[in-house]
Image (tube, coloured by chain):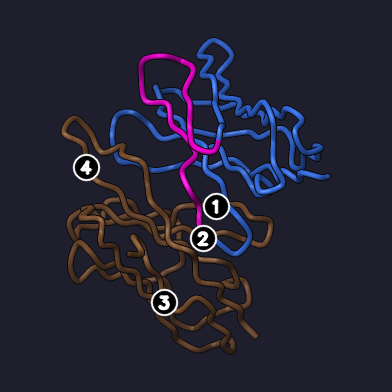
């Protein structure tokens, strides 16, 4: 019954490695997002896809690459992990209203990434 | 661009007391407003939203918020809190014109004590 699910929930890895986080939603939404929450709990959007098309791409290092194979999935691949990448990464999804796109976003439980 | 200011980083309150969590925003365009709650080690859950209409909006768990356009505020209130309300609360805005890019405040930690 989980609406937005992320895997893995915890990810501990060494600096320099490449890792992926997967996200799936079963709400029938057509827009998905990735957010980063830092150690001070500040949340900032990274990317957004609508129907597999990139629509928001904030100032994020090129080492981060989102991939949306279909509108129910949005994965995040991170190359050459750095210490500063340690954070909680949240996936979210929302529907598209008839008159706009500002439907409330539904969040997953987060992936806690720790870089050693 | 939008910005959101949550004036209190921590709010301690006794159980059954009322609480108000403050949120002010800045934007050159009209916005929709949201409050989200984050329980420990969990994702964000939508508490309530203001899209249009009545400026007093009611959400889940007995919370309500009032949109004040002249003061650019969207303060969250609950008349009587419970221990289970202990959590981090985030105010967020997004432009009404589309894109659905949420801009969050820095969060307010509500700690309910016996």
Is the Cβ of the residue at disc 2 closer than 8 Å to that at disc 4? no
Q: Residues within 10 Å of mark 1 (few under 14, many from 20)?
A: many
- From the viewer's side, name the closer residue of A6 and A43: A6
Q: Which residue is mark 4?
A: A96
Residue A35 in the image: above or below residue A5:
above
**Is residue B92 at all visible to an observer of this figure?**
no
| Mark closer to the chain start, 4 or 3 | 3
**Chain B drawing hue:** blue
Which chain contains the residue that carries disc 4?
A
How many circles with numbers are drawn on the protein? 4
- Which region is colored magenta? B43-61
**Residue B112: percent from left, percent from top:** 76, 44
Residue at position x 56%, y 24% from top?
B74
**Chain A drawing hue:** brown
Q: Is residue B48 magenta?
A: yes
**Residue B114: percent from left, percent from top:** 83, 44
**Residue B89: percent from left, percent from top:** 61, 43
Q: Which residue is mark 2?
A: A36
Would residue B101 be found to the left or right of residue A94 on screen?
right
Using the numbered discs, state the Cα–Cα distance from disc 2 to disc 4 in whole angstroms. 23 Å
**Residue B76: percent from left, percent from top:** 60, 29
User: Element type at marker 4?
Assistant: loop
Using the numbered discs, state the Cα–Cα distance from disc 3 to disc 2 in whole angstroms. 15 Å
Would residue A6 be found to the left or right of residue A80 on screen?
left
């Amino acid at each position: 019954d989980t609406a937005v699910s992320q895997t893995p929930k915890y990810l501990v890895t060494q600096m320099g490695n490449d890792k992926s986080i997967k996200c799936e939603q079963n709400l029938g939404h057509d827009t998905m997002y990735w957010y980063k929450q830092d150690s001070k709990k500040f949340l900032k959007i990274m990317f957004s896809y609508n129907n597999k098309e990139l629509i928001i791409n904030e100032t994020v290092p090129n080492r981060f690459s989102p991939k949306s194979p279909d509108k129910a999935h949005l994965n995040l691949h991170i190359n050459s992990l750095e210490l500063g990448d340690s954070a909680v990464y949240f996936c979210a999804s929302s529907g598209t209203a008839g008159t706009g796109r500002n439907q409330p976003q539904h969040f997953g439980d987060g992936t806690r990434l720790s870089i050693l | 661009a939008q910005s959101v200011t949550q004036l209190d980083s921590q709010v301690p309150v006794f159980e059954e007391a009322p609480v108000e969590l403050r949120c002010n925003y800045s934007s050159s365009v009209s916005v929709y407003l949201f409050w989200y709650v984050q329980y420990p080690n969990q994702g964000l859950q939508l508490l309530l939203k203001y899209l249009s209409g009545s400026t007093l909006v009611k959400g889940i768990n007995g919370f309500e918020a009032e949109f004040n356009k002249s003061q650019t505020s969207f303060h969250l209130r609950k008349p009587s809190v419970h221990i289970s309300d202990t959590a981090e609360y985030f105010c967020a805005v997004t432009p009404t014109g589309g894109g659905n890019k949420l801009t969050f405040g820095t969060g307010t930690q509500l700690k309910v004590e016996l």
